[in-house]
Image (spheres, rainbow, N blue to C red):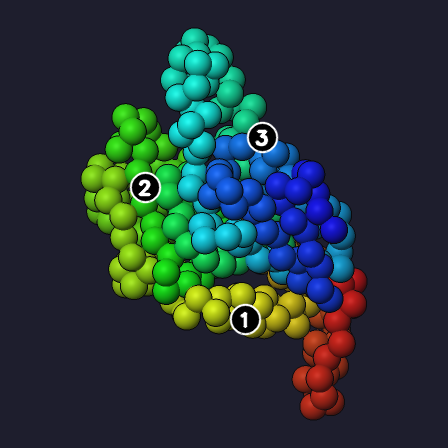
Amino acid sequence: MTMGGAAVLYEQTGHIVTLTLNMPELRNPVSDPAIITGLLEAFERMNADKNVRAAILTGAGTAFSSGGNLKSMAAPDGNAHAAPVDNRLWYVEGIQRIPFAFERLEVPIIAAVNGPAIGAGCDLACMCDIRVAASSATFAESFVKIGLVPGDGGAWLLPRAIGQSRAREMAFTGDTITADTALAWGLVSYVVDDADLLTKATSIADRIAVNPPLAVRMTKKLMTSGQDMTLERVLDFSAAMQPLAHATRDHHEALGAFMEKREPSFAGK
């Protein structure tokens, strides 16, 4: 099925959802309103569907995402000619809703970067929990090349993915890096042949999906929240969440399966 029109394809196989940015003729610009709407709707659906245990995000065609639509930006009614107050609202009510939606997404999501991830497209990959790149993938924090700053949270996201020095190098130069460089810098976890990209991403999703789904969702919440917490607050939050995990049927099923030397069967309860 599709959501957000045809701009974002939503496909569920078992416990895994694959989202595909589906505007290949424009290289999947994440700033497009239809893609923004499609992602927000898809995330709400996944949060509500307890049968979903992991997700994959990729792009149709040869690009993961080109970021912004420069032709639209340069048009007479585009951002380049808009009043500053209108531009601010365009970001707040538009693309900036995406990183908030990723932060609220309860299931782990894997970026399967199938081609160029440029500007906001690079930041989109950073919003995902795990990143896998095709060998043809490239990455660029290229806002400075067109006289702009990262308007979608990239100044927060990229340093957390690769550290301050590398992130600032990418942001200040706007240079493009290869998939192999992204792997060396820790931006992605794996680089695989283009033909094997979704197979690799799905194998990771499968390894996630076999675990107790409530524990996975709580672990993601804990790790996401922990990025801005002191150790003391993380420990307090962990102490509050752990009794909830102990009370789940899946926890008792895992203990029983371990003691009985059998495979567990988790129901998400």
Mark toward the start of the polypeptide (3 vs 2): 3
Pointer 2: what residue? 141
Q: Earlier in the sequence, mark 2 or mark 1?
A: 2
Q: Position of residue 103 (x, y in %)?
A: 55, 43
Kind of residue indicated by mark 2: Glu
Residue ID at (45%, 32%): 69
Residue 113: name its quadrant: bottom left
Tags 1 and 3 touching, CB below 8 Å: no
Q: Which mark is residue 199?
A: 1
Task: Give me the residue at 45% from left, 50% from top.
Answer: 63
Q: Element at badge 1?
A: helix
Q: Quadrant of residue 152?
A: top left
Mark 3 surroundings within 10 Å by alpha-carbon count, few (fewer than 14), some (14 through 19), many (20 or more):
some
Which residue in the structure is indicated by mark 3? 33
Q: In the picture, residue 153 is in which quadrant?
A: top left
Cα distance in 3D space between marks 2 and 1: 27 Å
Instruction: Give SS at disc 2.
Output: loop
- The mark nearer the N terminus, 1 or 3, is 3
The residue at 46%/25% (across/down) is 72
Q: Is residue 100 visible?
A: no
Nearest to viewer (mark 3 / mark 2): 3
Left or right of residue 217: residue 160: left
Closer to the camera in the image, 242 or 110: 110
Expressed as whole percent of the image width and height from the top left, the position of residue 104 reads: 60, 42
Q: Is residue 139 left or right of residue 43?
A: left
